[in-house]
Amino acid sequence: MTASLIGERIQDLLDRRSAVSLQQQLYRHFREMIEDGTLRPSSRLPSTRSLATQLGVSRITIVAAFDMLTADGYLVGSIGSGTFVVDRPPIRSHTVATRAVPPDAISLRGQLILSGASGLQQREGAFLPGVPDVAAFPYAVWQKLQNRYLGQHLAQLSGYANGGGYLPLRRSLADYLRVARGVRCNPEQVLVTMGTQQSLDLIVRLLTDANDQVCIENPSHWAGALMLKSLGVRSVPVNVDREGIDMRDQHYAMNPKLVFVTPSHQFPLGSILSSSRRERLLREAAQRNFWIVEDDYDSELRYDQAPSPSLQGEDSSGRVIYLGTFSKVMYPGIRMSYMVVPSSLVSSMVRGLLSLYRPGHLPLQAALADFISDGHLTRHLINVRPLYAARQAELRKCLAETFGDAISLSSGFAGLHLTLRFRQAVDLDALQAQAAKRDVLLRRLSAFNHDVGPFEDGFVLGYGALSQDDIGTAVKRLYEVYQTTHNGPC
Amino acid sequence: MTASLIGERIQDLLDRRSAVSLQQQLYRHFREMIEDGTLRPSSRLPSTRSLATQLGVSRITIVAAFDMLTADGYLVGSIGSGTFVVDRPPIRSHTVATRAVPPDAISLRGQLILSGASGLQQREGAFLPGVPDVAAFPYAVWQKLQNRYLGQHLAQLSGYANGGGYLPLRRSLADYLRVARGVRCNPEQVLVTMGTQQSLDLIVRLLTDANDQVCIENPSHWAGALMLKSLGVRSVPVNVDREGIDMRDQHYAMNPKLVFVTPSHQFPLGSILSSSRRERLLREAAQRNFWIVEDDYDSELRYDQAPSPSLQGEDSSGRVIYLGTFSKVMYPGIRMSYMVVPSSLVSSMVRGLLSLYRPGHLPLQAALADFISDGHLTRHLINVRPLYAARQAELRKCLAETFGDAISLSSGFAGLHLTLRFRQAVDLDALQAQAAKRDVLLRRLSAFNHDVGPFEDGFVLGYGALSQDDIGTAVKRLYEVYQTTHNGPC
């Protein structure tokens, strides 16, 4: 390919109205021409001067692009003799033979971690649980706030997050939690984490040893149980009823190191921990020196009344570790969660956080601090609560109209999901499989069961990301599938 | 002391021509004013906003300093009502606990995690290791790229990162690593993690069981050893010499599950793994079915010659797990790292990643993909390599001119640090303490020692974030301190 031909080819490819700079375009196009063989190995490139003239581009721009290509190993140049494509240019696509997993490659611990329903990829559509309506989020505001910290300030926010997180965010959170959840804490008790899984991991690593016992709600979210088993800790599933976790004498008598609870809105069954059980749990924790881990994952989303106050706010003995997340009230991918730890644990937890995860993302933490303190979070919650409330009401209405007495639904007017159980025996496998064929994705309640005994299975129906029309359609399909699999075609 | 008086006092103390950053100066002056009682216990501090105005310093700088003081237990943020000196300020201790830690609160595992030098807060200034020059980073470009994905696109990128990360980023990384490091992989083998600690955690959790044995370099970075002990795995320290890790027959004979290595630029000693040792390591891994974990943490920063090719590229048996990070080539707080796993481990590793951490930050991953594919990363490296090369040369020159034959330095013309050892016995504790008083912060080499036997201690000197003037000043101070502590005043 002659020098002028190369120039013409590039000329055709350059887009002078593109947001991408000419230097980057030159870099990209030359690289592609080398990789696809248009420019042969060892072939000579036009001089930067002639190319500059031909393309009407500053020579500096072309030199800079050639520098990048040289640094990347596509070009070699020597003063005087010009610039050449290297003898053996990097080949773009190349296949690596896929191997089978070697025997015993995955450890027993690894197999425990990979077993179970934990690692599901998140998909969209009815009725996947735990998915908020990301369309309702104020992206323009959020972008503006983030840009406060992405410019010149970023240099000062480019390091690790020391001491538990960005202090203004911890202040905003302490303020917000006091008002919204009755949490009593100083900002330094608030630790910012990269997700509730990280909060749980830190707690289990610092406060338990292998073979210790930890009481968990049954059913409950898989994350807690997963962290426990991946660290060799024995989880003791405790039954959940309409009053929340049913801790009995024998559970307290085994002196658990931790008790994981979701008192404000049990996941997934939706019950609220009764005051008598709260009192005893707090009393026993103080007497027996175990820690209560309160996961308040979606308490902001309560639609009929104010959420029951947090256990942390009722705790006078410093035994409650409070967990919260922005996955539900903002969006899942933000990966920002927080924990409020008793003052006695602050210094240990902060050091553990630094050692184990080296947190960062300070610009995001700074923007989040403003999002809360400027009132945007409150405003957003005011917007989405009626949205979710209407969707749950619609789901209840549609299910009642179709299934009638054949089903029972979880109580509580809160959150982003309902649990559904059938009063009579139903082939849930068949129902789940058939529904999936019609894009109705059902999560089994048993996916959250950690016990060996008999378990009343059912489905967890998420409605957070569904319009009311979507809900109507999905319920209709679900009922049609139910009729064909259960009663046979009508 | 009134708010404005505090401001005036600080104003007098600030030295705007000092090599020490304003943030560090604020931190130290406030700490001293608290420790010497100038600022009384429980007294209120001026607001960061008013202090920023009074001092003419960015509010973020003041917030960052207060953040450090709070983490260190000098300040508390009381809900809504500002920042106060704690009731009982620590003298030398670094704790914020206002309630004593209950006996046995921290588990044995937790105590292991919290022991050792791992959890140090990152400070600025000479000679802290591992800190790149964040001032040289192209923030404007980075902000522009991020904004491509912070607007309306965010809704589509607001979920979790499924399947190992944002595919375009994994493609860009596969391309980049093939060219820059000779890594042979398909994009599916590239997993995006939230830091090398997370990469290590995933590997150790999935591929080892408690009491398994893992060979690590000695000395080596604390993160690997920390992950191992926090998961009950026994680490076997293997001596490092001029040819890198010195794996002997007995080490191979114990059939380790993993071997952690930094072959391109051993951390912290700087040696390069010799070809004979590379060949044997790869051969033994294939025969004995152990995994080699290659941490290529700073191979982009090599100044005299092209870095030695990655072990991964020489591995024909699929036994190498390759680790890389953006902490050095971009900035530490970005918390984006990656691993290239053998094809046989891809599906297990991807599922483990999802289950254990639920990754997200897709907008950041998307911007990073463009940063690489548009050539910005390459260009940034072209800019900083000569910068760091000059700084290391300056450090070597200054040390040679002052200390002469009294010291020996690590070999290798790469990275962001040098290791310094004294040929004769020196009171390193005294030297370290005295130097710290003059803002010369020395990291002990023994902080990276994992063995029980005798160890030739020294210092790890980071120069990445220091101007050549800073280096000259710091070395001068270090030598003065050395003379007073070693030979007595001259």
Image (cartoon, coloured by chain):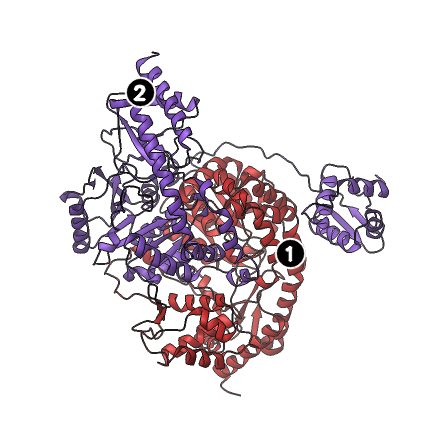
Chain colours: A purple, B red
Circle 1 crowding by C-alpha within 10 Å: few under 14, some 14–19, many from 20: some
Report in which chain the residue with disc 1 lies.
B
Mark 1 to mark 2 CA distance (whole Å): 60 Å
Circle 2 crowding by C-alpha within 10 Å: few under 14, some 14–19, many from 20: few
Residue A292, numbered label: none
Whether residue B457 is visible, yes or no, is no
Q: Between B38 and A298, which is closer to the camera in this rendering?
A: A298
Are the residues flagged by discs 1 and 2 in contact, CB closer than 8 Å? no
Question: Residue B324: x, y in percent?
Answer: 54, 50
Question: Residue B152: x, y in percent?
Answer: 54, 43
Give left or right: position of B222 versus A189: right
Question: Residue B176: x, y in percent?
Answer: 63, 46
Question: Residue B52: x, y in percent?
Answer: 48, 71
Vertical comparison of A459 with B482: above or below = above
Residue of label 1: B381
Quadrant of the drawing holding the N terminus of chain A = top right
Give left or right: position of A166 versus B315: left
Vertical comparison of A322 with A247: above or below = below
Q: Which residue is at 43% across, 61% downward?
A: A162
Vertical comparison of B54 with A275: above or below = below
Q: Which residue is at 35% across, 15% downward?
A: A484
Q: Between A326 and B225, which is closer to the camera in this rendering?
A: A326
Q: Marks 1 and 2: which is nearer the front?
A: 2
Indicate the amino acid at tag 1.
Answer: Leu
Report in which chain the residue with disc 2 lies.
A
Quadrant of the drawing holding the C terminus of chain A = top left
Secondary element at image label 1: helix
Q: Which residue is at 41% across, 33% downward?
A: A466
Indicate the amino acid at tag 2.
Answer: Asp
Residue of label 2: A427
